[in-house]
Image (tube, coloured by chain):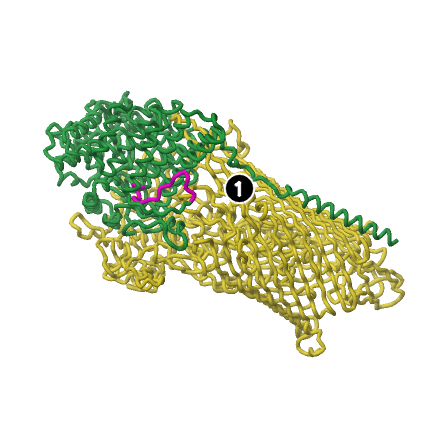
Chain colours: A green, B yellow
Amino acid sequence: MKTLLRSRLVLGTAFVALLGGITYACSNFLDTPAQGTLDESALQTKTGVEGSLIAAYRMLDCNAFVGAWGCAASNWVFGDITSDDSYKGSEATDQPGATQVELYTWNTGQAGDYFDQKWATSYEGVVRANATLRLLRGVMASKPGEISPVDSAGIEGEALFLRAHYHFEAWRMWGKIPYYYEGDTDYKKENNMSPDSVAKLIIADLDRAIAALPLIPRNGEVGRVTQWTAKAYKGRVLVYTGQYAAALVVLNDVITNGPYGLETSFDHVWTGFQALKNGPETIFAYEASANDGEPSGWNANWGETLNFPHSGSPFGCCGFHQPSQNLVNAYAVDGATGLPKVFTDPPGWNARDSTWVASVSDTVDPRLDWTVGRDFVPYKDWGLHQSDWIRTPAYGGRYSPKKNAQENASGSQSQVGWNKAQLNSVHIHLFRYADLLLLKAEAEVEVGSIPIAQGIVNQIRARAGVTAQGCGGAYNATTQAALEAAYPGCVGDARLAVPINDASIQWATYKVSAYTTAWPDQATARLAVRTERRLELGMEGQRFFDLRRWGEAYATTDINNYLTREKTRRGYKVAQLPFASKNMFYPIPPTEIDLSKVGGQDRLHQNPGW
Amino acid sequence: MQKVYRALGITFLFLLAVCGTALAQGTQVSGTVSSATTGEKLWGVTVRVKGTQTQTVTDQQGRYALVAPADAVLTFAQIGYRGKEQPIGGQSTIDMALEQAPTMLQEVVVTGYTSQRRADITGAVTSVNLDPVERQTSASVLQRLDGRVPGVTVQSSGSPGSRSTVRIRGITSFHDNDPLYIIDGTPVQGDSYLNFLNPNDIGEIQVLKDASAASIYGSRAGNGVIIIETKKGRPGGRQARLDVRTGVASPVHGLDDILMQSSLDYFEVIKRSYMNANQGRVDSLGNPIPYTLDSLPPTVLRIYGDPRNPTVPAYTYVDPGAVTARDSFGRPTVNRLAYNYPNLLIMPGSAGTNWWKAVFSPAQFSDANLSVSGGGVDNSYNVSFSYLKQDGTGAFSQFQRGSLRINTAFNVGRLQIGENLTIARQQNYGGIDDGNLGEDNIVGKNILMQPVVPIYDIGGHFASGKFSGGGNNTNPLKFAWARRFDRNTWDKVLGSAFAGTEIVRNLAFKSRFSFNLDQGSFKGFTPTTWENSEPVKVTSLNQNEQRGTEWTLANTFNYTWVTPQHNLSVLVGHEASQKTYRRIDGSIAALVNEDPASRYIDDALGSATTKNVTSAGALDRLLSFFGKADYNYQQRFYVSGTIRRDGSSKFGPGHRWGTFPGFNVGWRLSRESFFPQDGFLSNVMLRFGWGMTGSQLIPGGRIRAKFGGGRNDTFYDIGATGNSIQPGYRQIALGNASLGWETDKSTNVGADLEFAQGRGNLTIDVYNRIAGATKGHGILFDPRLPATAGFADPSVQNVAKMQNKGFDFALAYSGTIGAGKVWSVSVNAGHYKNKILEIAENLTQFFGPTGTRIGTAVINQIGQPIGAFYGLQANGYFPDSADAASHDDALGPCAVPPCQTNAKVGRIRFVDQITVDTNGDGRPDIRDGLITSADRTIIGSPHPDLTAGLDLGFRTGSWDFSATVFGSFGGQIFDAQKDFYVFRDFSTNVVKDRLTNSFCLPADDGCTNPYNQNAKYPRLDQFDASSPVISSYYVESGTYVRLRTVQVGWQVPASLLRWIPSARIYLQAENLFTITGYEGLDPALANQAPTAASGDVRDQAMGIDVGMYPSNRTITIGISTTF
């Protein structure tokens, strides 16, 4: 009996010990790989490096990780609604963060969220560019021959360019920013450099990119940057930093030897037609894609989703980014000279308070109707812009954005997404040739070569005078009937762009003439060049940065003049604070300052006044 | 209709009642059954007349009585004891002592792998009194625990089958604070519903509140442990029980009590908002332009017509294509024949739509349970079936559950084998996705539709606020209606098989294999909303299927040594478990046919290009060794020690293993010779416990960096094709190779007192818990990194530290008034104080998840509790324009006084906090003269100071009466709904007293009490963008007292029910009344459940009212029979 008991005891114990032993001794019982992910070694290949580079390009616009809307490629929040070009639009309480940005109440938490989106988007671009450089170096060292020297140089050049670009985006927002290289492991670097010093680093990266990049896009893929892109961009940064002589050297090189030129017709600049995209005028763009297999339309200009006419329109939503009365007034043309009233009538050009609706008695620059949607004027090929396209006229006025809208016939509209009519593959210009030419004109003015500047402005105006918005056709029978009822000349005429004096045009009188009289002095030249820049690049996210570039005094006067008048037009504008010194830079997002502290001490120092 | 159901239900009951067996006739026998070992009276022993169906069960004093033939034989049986037989032999009193079965411990209280006599427990363990738990009607047993267990809080909404947030003694982590559930030995973690479990199956619940009791569960016990044992069979005759009940639930409180119901009153709000907003509007010369009735925006006049004589509009929205003319106010003449859904919509006006009533109405519920249990000398069984159906009070919502439970045990020779098994299916639709409270549901903002908006358009389709100024909401009824075919289905098979034997005398071995199989599926439909201001123009369908498999193998040895002096029990064991999970999600948009039969993800049924599929999964393993020793000397001195060693696959090599010790000691003072034996106190036990527990509640795979990408994130059209993308990759998560255990320490001091001859007892515990107590073993947390580190999920680290201090107590007393009249009262209460001690290196605070339209109202700050409210301090309203001007930098620079952007008379005035340090001592000493985000401060806390439950009972004859009152005191609520119903964000409806209780100036329309600083709302002001910012204005007291249940029961006299031994009929009301100062919908607020990369972060969203599904007032009638 005792033996039996003992044997049972031994048996039972052995059984348990065995079970325990097996699981414990099998040390790999607790080794479970992460599920559904790649590990780092999977990327140590050419595919991995190229993929990392693709991801770096992708940060040019919003993506699923920064959905709204400070991430937009077009910079509409920070470049336009804080300037005199546009309002946030929509309704007072929609996107309160953007409202706070517009009203210059930049120290509210809601505005802070918007700044943080831009900060995060810019630095994620830097992070991805640096990851590409690190991976490239790793693969070149560990697997020689995996990547050809040509590709290696190209990848490096593209990544360096993108790193410079993303830093530039942050730099023109905040000035003194930390600059990150591929070897950095400390992501709490101090922003202890002046804005000018940061710009030098951007230029240094561009110089390295220029040295490494090919003359034509690698693999024939036109979304890739080339040596010419980098040179053009360097010119841009030099103008931004006031280094006009140096800028002219590189800009002249690009103009003389580079592949760029102006589009013949203005409507080819912002377009959804695949055949017209990435024409000679495109230097660098966010290459949006629609119907690319992504089921929600995230690649189809998500950053612009809100910037379409509202519910009565074929788009449906959301009435953001509405052009200001001030901007529309700026397109008024002096009937006698064909020059902008801004130039011919400085005190009086902004007097008009009434909405510019279709009227042949108004003489305007044809670019107005490529830039601004207004009532009873054909809206590309969608039919007449109607008053019920506007969400809240009492709040945001009666104009709609237009450049980012696709042409109905282009087929570039997304077939998927939350509101698919507001997603398209129109490529968003980050830098285009007309912009470059106007930067050169500025530089020429500053170095005293006024006639050259005048020549450039006339070149821009000549192109602007080629075509104007035509009847366009409409998107369905009802709207076609409305179009034909309003303009009988549009029966059987669905041309999107027509000569500016075409008989079919019954909604405006278009005129844009060259400056024939030589500009007498720098001040006149500046006024003409800056006015031209505004008309050409209206609603393209440049204006606020331009105003600031032209100096604090200039920006203060311009914005405050704008506000004085605009407050009488838009009630809510009363709440907008005046432009002050501190508005020369946006506040660094307080969240980032908090998150970057080391030992309780700030590593990111706030901009003056914030 | 509901009445018919109820009537049918009751008829059914009585029909069933006929099926009972007749009572036998004979002599009366009674007696007491006790334990042969300890002399303790045994409760629940089945006493049966051998060879018949006549049987009874002993009461808590071990007494029984039955009628039997004088020559019959009685059998006495109870699991854990050796069965006995005794011939009656003409005796009228038969006392019986049962010997403990050698391999079964006294199944008294299961406290983790083993069980203990209740009286011998020295840790902080609460045994839940199940009677009142059984009485409540919620689908989940967790919700029924609310207010029952001192130190345990439960939050849930009134949505059918809703989630419960159970917290034991505060909160110990920034994420995932759900306790560990042990259901018949099977661990279940990460389930906040427990809806698969039929509450009627529950036999006992122990809550292990402190680490000295819970450390036997080591790594997973950091949030406390709730042990649930289901009902087991007892040897003896078959006993069947049928419980059926049905009832009607209606919302405790409706938004129609709160919101404005008349369109014309609402017009008055709009009108005054504009008229009052005149200051600051200036003409080109800077002169103020006041709004007048004539300058109201045309969009307003177009709806309400003549502002001097506003009328309910004939139409709110008319497509321009149907407008034939407009009057001078812009109101249209309409060609109704042009209506063409969805291209040309025409919506009528409403004098006042009651949106609440449109969506919420009383709802029926019914619940039926049938159980059969019994057993022989060598077996026992309990089988139960249940079906529960709960309609939601919100339209088109329902929860239903069917479950089957089988518990069996067999003695096969010296081997005991058995199994516990639940098979359940739950299905629900509509209601509210518990993770998604807020405006995207039928309660949230959607219920804040303007009264002028009609429910239907002229064509009978749903209408909404498409007109300018109509808000951009979705019609809530449409929202529910369109989703009425959505289904969320969960299948569950959970249980264990076990085997045990006595190896040698006093040494038992037990092995248990547990399994937890889950299968879930969801299909959801998103409709088009052409009637909306921001229309959705494509339908879409999403579907997911998921499967979870968890197994646990536990082997234990248990040695017991019992002498009259010494009582020792030693347990050693080993456990291994694995959890796998996999899900697949699919979606497709632009369905060709919206019919439910066509809602499949198929190229032909929708837009093929929108088809999308993703999958995800997890694999985690855990390996453990543990031991426990309990010793007591003469039941005077107690000492108990536990140690557990756990290895987790979630941690890196070298950091995987953690050790979690615990001990407690007890002294039963009342057994000492010096203790007065006949005094007021009859039992006094003093207890002290200390222990460590752990947590590994993070997703697996976080020890290494992860890479990946997505078409919506890293892929790009580098070839500028316009319609294709190339793959891109990025780092998606940072890894931390030195990730290790989170270790929590807790100390507990307690006392158990029994007084007044055992009629009363008091248990009180005081505790101090520190989560993340030791260096390198901090709370698992992923502090956010600066954006310069990129989008990659930050690594999880052992960094944070949190403290919970508090006490809880339970006091009960029962007495009699004359013969047969028994009354009882019990109170339980708990208090905790949560405090964040550390967050991460260099991090003193971080914001909680953004759960509201106006941003995040929550900060987690060192020295403050988790989820504290954070914002500006409101200080009344600007009394006059002079005061406003001194605060205003909108129109001109304000030099010294606190300059508040957009300050205007009647708007909320904020406090300029002392924020500037001028003398360099590191402490701010002056104000900066500006109201900025730097002036934000802690403005409240959602944590109650005290939660308490009160149970009252009274029984006389065949009648019984009981009531439960629950109270929560000292907590606060951040009523984020004020952004809508006070400030009219997004043109929503407003509170009904907005016209009468707002700050106003004498010249304002309708102003009767000018300059009133006590007005509830700031001045109506169309352009007031400054008052709505996050501030203490949103914070209200969340204190409330609620009559949770009242029940009257009647034991049907045997004379009326001759065929069944027992039937009880009862009528119950839940949530009959609430006393609260909270003006929102319901102070018993359920959290939102936001998720972050680290998991569920709902404890950072406590007390934020973003539109909760209200609690229900439920009237139930039921019958309970045994036969």
Rendered location of residue A477, percent (x, y): 34, 26
* Residue closer to the observer: A561 or B813: A561
Q: Is residue B881 visible?
A: yes
Rendered location of residue B423, percent (x, y): 67, 45
Q: Is residue B246 visible?
A: no
Residue at screen point 69% across, 62% down: B1051
Rendered location of residue A373, percent (x, y): 27, 34
Taking the magenta stretch, the answer to whether it contains residue B291 is no
Magenta span: predominant SS is loop
Residue at screen point 84% across, 68% down: B93
Rendered location of residue B420, percent (x, y): 71, 49
The residue that label 1 is drawn on is B704
Q: Residues within 10 Å of mark 1 (few under 14, many from 20)?
A: many
Q: Is residue B1054 left or right of residue B1013?
A: right
Relative to A297, does residue B97 appear above or below in the rendering? below
Magenta region: A171-185
Q: Chain of mark 1?
A: B
What is the quadrant of residue A484 in the picture?
top left
* Residue closer to the observer: B2 or B617: B617
Q: Amino acid at mark 1?
A: Arg
- The quadrant the C terminus of chain B occupies is bottom right
